[in-house]
Structures are given as C-alpha cells and as structure tokens.
Image (tube, helix red, strand yellow):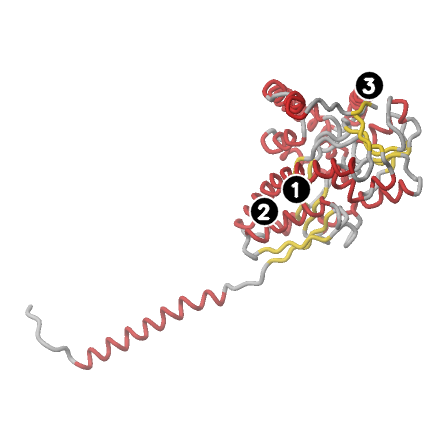
Amino acid sequence: MKKTGKQNPQVQSSRRGFLGKAAAGTATAIAFPAVATAQAPTQFRFQSTWPAKDIFHEYANDFAKKVNDMTGGELKIEVLPAGAVVPAFGLLDAVSKGTLDGGHGVMGYNYGKQAAIALWTSGPAFGMDANMVLAWHKYGGGKELLAKLYDSIGANIVSFLSGPMPTQPLGWFKKPITKPADFKGLKFRTNGLAIDLFTSMGAAVNALPGGEIVPAMDRGLLDGAEFNNATSDRILGFPDVSKICMLQSFHQSSEQFEITFNKTKFNALPAKLKAIIENAVESASADMSWKAVDRYSADYRELQTKNGVKFYKTPDTFLQEQLKVWDEVVAKKGEGNPLFKEVEASMRAFAERAVKWDMDTNNPRRMAYNHYFGKQPAKKG
C-alpha cells in the first residue's frame, strides 16, 4: 500500500504523549528500586583475647580491615581488646550466646569445654608445624572434626582458623633450664593441653591470659612463663621481669588463631558476604605469616641488643622428655573421649605423610645460613 504524505496531527500528538509517559514510567521504574533497596551497613562487634598493644590484636584488626574493605562497607567489623566486653577466657560463650557477634582468639582457651579442641594448638602435632596443621584442617578432615566438636558442646559458632604461628619458646625463667628436673615445683604459666604436659613434668601450672602474665611474674607468683613470640613477649614486658628465654619446645608447635562468628548471625548474611569473609580469613592468614617473619625477627634481635636478653636452646633431653610425657597425657585424655581419639588419629595419619615429605624435600636452612653469615650456633642450656 502506498504511503500518503503527512500524518494526522492528532495521531502524532497522541504518539508523543504515549512515548513521553512511557519514558517517565521507565525512569520511575529505574530510580525506585535504588531507593527501596538502600540499606544501612551490617555492624558486627568483635572482641579479641589480646591486650590492645599486642601484635595479636593488630592481627585481629588486620582481618577486620580486609573484610570491611572487600565488602565496600556493606559489613563493618569493629574489634575490641580483651576485657572490653568479657574476659579473654569468656570469648567462646559470649560469641555463642550472641553477646558478641564474633571474636579473635586461640582454641587453647576453650580447652576446658572439650580437651580435644586443644589438639589443634597444643603438643608436638606429630612433627607438623602450624602451616601443616592448617593444611590438615582444610584438606585432611580437621575442619569437619572441629565443627563436630563444637556441636558436641552446644557452641553456636562458625569457626575459621588463620595465621600459622612459629614454634613457641619454652618460656622465660630466672635461670636457664638445663634438665627436666628443673621443672619440679616450678610455678609456671601455659594454656591448653600444655597444662597437663607441664603438670605431669612436676610444675605448678597457672593458666593466665596474655595481659596478666608479666604482672604475675613481677609479683613472684610465677617462676617462669611462656606466651608466644619475640614481638608479643617484648611488647608485653617479659624482658622487664626476666633476661633468660629458652627457645624451642614441643608444648605448642602448631598454634594458630581462631576467628569465630555467632552461627545464627553468620548464617543470616548474604552468600556474597559469607564468601568475602572466608576469603578474607585466608588472606589475613598469609599476611600474618609474612608480617610475623618481619616483626618477630626484628624484635628477636632487639631483645638481645637493646634489652640484654639471653636466648638458650632448650636441651634435647628436655625435648625428649616432653615427647614421652605428651604421649602419656594424650593416652589418658583419650580414655572415655572418642572425639579426642578421632581427632588425634586423623591428625596422625596426615602428619605421617606430610612431615616425611617436608623433611625429605626442603633444604637444611642452617647449612645455608652458616655458609653466608658464619656459623653462629644457639647457646645451649
């Protein structure tokens, strides 16, 4: 059909009106959802089990910042120091009950709830270091076992492990430890299953949170104590009350941090925020391990050059006694505690292949160090 010339003005006017209304409707449809879905950020209040000045509290803040940055402000985690809401040893209950939305601590502080929880953090871990324990936790069944343990005690939490810690010193003392008998009657601070280890070795053990250890040593309530690393120990004031530190020990070869969330509140988060948290945990874990190498090595040197601390290697006779006594402790703890036995068996099976691979594969670092920097053996106790 042949088109005619001009269209009816009324038709053109009607069409323009329809298009104008449609455009206005489209604009309204686009703008309206943006207003309707705008929400305030989700606020989570955390507490650490560490004094505000400790590098451990810094690690907690590092994790929170990663989450806050990656969520673009949708989730904001505020971290308070130990004691701000509850005592350090009360963190698990506070998170489980929802008094706190989450926390940053170590599993050894939950040892009294179920002894098997401390297997992640206490003892020789069959020769594994903390990074290997984290490998077992993620890929060898540890994660599922830990969830099972928390379910068994009714803990309403979601747990993430992060931050492999180097082997911890035996501790700070008035004089060097030269033999196992030196621990007989010694008033000593530790935590987790190391309480049972050192008690069996004859010490009078007192479990104290980090901020209370140095004051107790200063008042003579402790003859010796261990906490964790050169940086934390320097910041907390250990060199003010002792100038002797014994390096190497099997009582805590494998400790790592635990980041917990109230399960109800965590499960209510959108899938995107849960995924960000899980990835932030692993990012913080790697970052912490790198920062630890830098800071701990610098403070280890400073403790010697500026604080006059003398470091001694714990004698092999003492380390061998620790292994012997540890086997007795875990055998006793496993009696009547099938979950304890299940965790230990799983960890052992993973360690048997992982530790052999590690020893057979990696170069002897002391050989390379001596080649480049000269032979500097550690003092013997």
Compared across the picture, whether 128 is left or right of 37 comes to: right
Position above or below: 78 against 260? below
Query: Which secondary structure, mark 3?
Result: helix
Would you name the residue on which mark 3 appears? 317
Residue visible at 82% across and 28% down in the picture: 197
Whether pointer 2 and pointer 1 mark residues with C-beta atoms closer than 8 Å, the reply is no
Position above or below: 381 against 137? above
Of callouts 3 and 2, which one flags the residue occurring earlier in the amino acid sequence? 2
Say which quadrant the C terminus sits in: top right
Query: Which secondary structure, mark 2?
Result: helix
Would you name the residue on which mark 1 appears? 159
User: Would residue 162 be visible to someone looking at this image?
Assistant: no
Give the CA separation, mark 3 to mark 2. 44 Å
Compared across the picture, whether 3 is left or right of 381 comes to: left
Say which quadrant the N terminus sits in: bottom left
Q: Amino acid at mark 1?
A: Ser
Tell me the mark number nearer the camera, choosing from 3 and 2: 3
Position above or below: 126 against 13? above
Neighbour tally class for label 3: few under 14, some 14-19, many 20 plus, Cα within 10 Å = few
Q: Residue furthest bottom?
A: 10
Tell me the mark number nearer the camera, choosing from 1 and 3: 3
Position above or below: 15 against 242? below
Would you name the residue on which mark 2 appears? 277
